[in-house]
Image (spheres, rainbow, N blue to C red):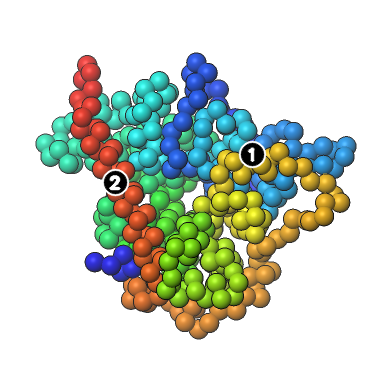
Amino acid sequence: MSISSLQSPPSSAPLSSNSSSLHRGGERTFLSSQVTFSLLKSQRSFPQIRASSAGFVSFDTGVTTELDAVSRFSEIVPDTVIFDDFEKFPPTAATVSSSLILGICSLPDTIFRNTVDMALADSTCSALDNPDLRMACFTNKALVNAGADLAKLVPGRVSTEVDARLFFDTHGIIRKVHDLLKLYDEVGVPPERLLFKIPSTWQGIEASRLLETEGIQTHLTFVYSFAQAAAAAQAGVSVIQIFVGRIRDWARNHSGDPEIEASLKRGEDPGLALVTKAYNYIHKYGYKSKLMAAAVRNKQDLFSLLGVDYIVAPLKVLQSLKESVTTPDEKYSFVWRLSPHSAANYNFCEEELAKWDQSSLSNAMGPAPVELLRVGVQGYIDQAKRVEELFSKIWPPPNV
């Protein structure tokens, strides 16, 4: 079976830090390289947030850091959070995933450990005779417990990973989201605080469309082609995530993808080109989706994407931006690389403007998005299996 068949201007108020409550005894508490604490706010049109509460602007001299400057154009999302870094780069929302659960289980002293222990002590899950259903129940409980705790720590939305093993099952994805929503409701987290992270197979896109009609916000991941991005926008997906660096990596080591080859012939970076094209499509035709550029590898990537809704950047890039000072007479200036105005002038061909369906999506996806989507989904599946294998080894917990 082929994979291809398959987010008002932000407030300028400073962000608060919760780092003191997230680690103990001065130890550095690290969860996982796949854990992303995102700056996803519920409603906004042009992103202009401040990434820290102090020290970024000198009102006497007009001096500002690069981080402060670029944050006027796009929401800057810290990728990979070491809890001690919350004071430097405080998140306003969070992503909950199998990777996060594995990280929690590896840190017995973390305050989040209780989220797993409580899940494994759940009587409803424990009463299930089928071991696979029991482990799936424990995993759902652990994800929601962690999401509920994070929702208390951040003011924005919590994005919860949906089991990637359902990537070919539209109704299975919808049932899973409904199950997670019910669990979130039981612990007092309202739907408007939530996103559900779904792989961008056709079935994932269709599930997102149906969920969005119910008012359930979705976060489509593993988007590596214009066809996926356009289909997701037409489906009304809340957040569409494109991995810039992964597309570039594929292009460096492979050939034969028409979309990538076309970008290279124009002298463009294929990952940056896809974000630009998807942004222009969304804004030119008035779709509600917000676009997230992930796997941004360096400052030049970030500068090239200013204006996109969200930019996910490594901590080393954020630290470099924070330490770099700009002045009004800087030899270069920060400009809008992406904007509704530039989008209005972008031209699309007739085929790109068609209503996307499963067949046209499959035909339009070249070898790069097919392979990258497969690898991404498999990674999520492997992590989900690792969580269930771990839970089967440590359940039942002591005294239960």
Who's the residue at 48% across and 63% down the image?
252
Mark on residue 9? none
Q: Quadrant of the N terminus?
A: bottom left
Left or right: 10 in relation to 358: right
Left or right: 257 in relation to 19: left
Left or right: 266 in relation to 165: right
Up-down relation of residue 47 to residue 12 (above or below): below
Up-down relation of residue 228 to residue 199 (above or below): below
Mark on residue 319? 1
The disc, 1 or 2, on the residue closer to the chain's N-terminal end is: 1
Who's the residue at 63% across and 33% down the image?
88
Residue 272 visible in image: yes
Q: Nearer the viewer, residue 23 or 262?
A: 262
| Mark 1 to mark 2 CA distance (whole Å) | 32 Å
Mark on residue 382? 2
Local packing at callout 2 (Cα closer than 10 Å; few below 14, some 14-19, many 20+) is some
Q: Nearer the viewer, residue 356 or 106?
A: 106
Q: Quadrant of the C terminus?
A: top left
